[in-house]
Image (cartoon, rainbow, N blue to C red):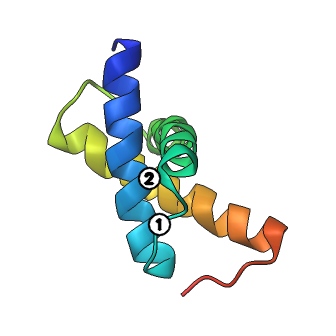
Amino acid sequence: MSIISWIILGLIAGFLGSKIVNKSGQGMLLDIVLGVVGAVVGGVIFSFFGASGITGLNIYSLIVAVIGSIVVLYLYHSVTGRRSL
């Protein structure tokens, strides 16, 4: 995947993950960063369980990235002390 695809996937995954975790976004830049990190984490989690990770800019990869961004956002909120949910 190109860097533009990672940014687009990260923005969407970070935004959706932020809405699921705490009902408001973290800001566009932080949403992108947390979404891209979440995509990588989601890929690792899915690979650990035998499924494929990020495969491109498609719905499956978006689901993997959103799940990973939810995990990253929970960790982010627990480290920074911000409330989630």
Residue 69 position in % (x across, y down): 50, 54
- Of the image marks 1 and 2, the number of the one nearer the N terminus: 2
Q: Is residue 64 left or right of residue 82?
A: left
Asked if the residues shown at circle 1 and circle 2 are in contact, with their CB atoms under 8 angstroms apart, the answer is yes
Identify residue for label 1.
25
Residue 56 position in % (x across, y down): 25, 24
Within 10 Å of the Cα at label 2, are there few (<14), some (14-19), or many (20+) other Cα atoms? many
Within 10 Å of the Cα at label 1, are there few (<14), some (14-19), or many (20+) other Cα atoms? some
Q: Is residue 41 above or below residue 71?
A: above
Identify residue for label 2.
14
The quadrant the C terminus occupies is bottom right
Q: Residue at x 38, y 43 (%)?
A: 11
Q: Residue at x 39, y 72 (%)?
A: 19
Q: Is residue 83 above or below residue 25?
A: below
Q: Residue at x 46, y 39 (%)?
A: 39
Mark 1 → mark 2, Cα distance in angstroms: 8 Å
